[in-house]
């Protein structure tokens, strides 16, 4: 499928991920407890965006929630990143949006050591994910665990978390989010304990999630990749589609 068609699929999912119930033209994705809001798509002109940036900032401040605005490289509105920076939003790292067509995947690329991977569903499994995150020095571990737990309770069919183990200890993990379209999924949260890197664990957890997605009938899998993971994912068959950058 051509890149333009894949971008249409991605943008369609962005609209479905978010909600535009207030008629503002902004599509917002909320955390289960509504402590975090992420703007994932907009149907606004540049002049409308200039007003919306300040309005959304004021709503977040008054409502006491964290706000993130995701800007994509193919978005048509010019000057949005400059508007966000001028309003005091902090720019995050630029990530490459990659896509994999599961109908054309070469599974031999995932041949590697047969690590034990499990799908976790409960507090014990989330504690294993948290243990990995703590070894990476992440500061938001407890909040993330609470958020993932809420997501599993509210929409268990929409999230799957995979963990790889060595000698019974959790060493690598990753999530797969299933969109509202049956043929689309998104990888996120890929992490490996530093002492166990370069052993194929990251790829093993990617493979476990892709096989699950294929079994569920998904066609396209997207992922926002940092420079550290992009080379691994492209080697596994993912292709670059666009870029994305968070502003908080």
Image (cartoon, rainbow, N blue to C red):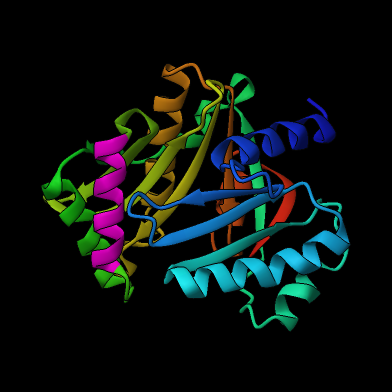
Residue at point 25%, 70% (across, down): 134
User: Which of 245/46 is in front?
Assistant: 46
Q: Position of residue 228 (x, y in %)?
A: 55, 64
Q: Is residue 176 magenta?
A: no
Residue at point 58%, 24% (across, down): 102
Q: Is residue 238 visible?
A: no
Relative height, residue 201 to residue 156 (above, below)? below
Q: Is residue 145 magenta?
A: yes
* Residue 57 left/right relative to 52: left
* Residue 194 left/right relative to 246: left
The dominant secondary structure in magenta is helix
Relative height, residue 79 to residue 125 (above, below)? below
Relative height, residue 208 to residue 193 (above, below)? above
In the picture, which quadrant includes the C terminus?
A: bottom right
Q: Position of residue 58 (x, y in %)?
A: 58, 73
Q: Position of residue 5 (x, y in %)?
A: 80, 29
For the image, the number of numbered tags is 0
In the picture, which quadrant includes the N terminus?
A: top right
Residue at point 83%, 29% (across, down): 2
Q: Position of residue 247 (x, y in %)?
A: 62, 70
Q: Is residue 161 visible?
A: yes
User: Which of 21/101 is in front?
Assistant: 21
Q: Which residues are magenta?
A: 141-154
């Amino acid at each position: 499928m051509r890149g333009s068609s894949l971008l249409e699929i991605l943008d369609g999912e962005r609209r479905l991920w978010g909600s535009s119930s207030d008629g503002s033209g902004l599509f917002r994705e909320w955390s289960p407890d509504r402590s975090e809001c992420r703007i994932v798509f907009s149907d606004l002109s540049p002049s409308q965006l200039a007003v919306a940036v300040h309005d959304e900032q004021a709503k977040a401040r008054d409502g006491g929630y964290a706000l993130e605005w995701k800007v994509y490289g193919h978005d048509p509105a010019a000057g949005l990143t400059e508007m966000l920076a001028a309003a005091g939003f902090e720019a995050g790292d630029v990530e490459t949006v990659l896509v994999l067509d599961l109908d054309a995947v070469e599974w031999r690329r995932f041949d590697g050591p047969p690590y034990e991977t499990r799908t976790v569903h409960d507090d014990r499994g989330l504690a294993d994910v948290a243990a990995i995150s703590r070894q990476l020095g992440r500061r938001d571990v407890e909040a993330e665990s609470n958020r993932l737990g809420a997501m599993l309770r509210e929409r268990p069919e929409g999230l799957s978390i995979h963990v790889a183990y060595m000698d019974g200890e959790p060493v690598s993990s990753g999530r797969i989010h299933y969109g509202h379209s049956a043929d689309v999924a998104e990888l996120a949260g890929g992490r490996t304990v530093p002492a166990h890197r370069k052993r194929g664990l990251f790829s093993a957890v990617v493979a476990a999630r892709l096989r699950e997605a294929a079994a569920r009938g998904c066609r396209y899998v997207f992922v926002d990749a940092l420079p550290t993971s992009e080379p691994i994912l492209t080697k596994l068959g993912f292709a670059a589609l666009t870029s994305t950058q968070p502003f908080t």
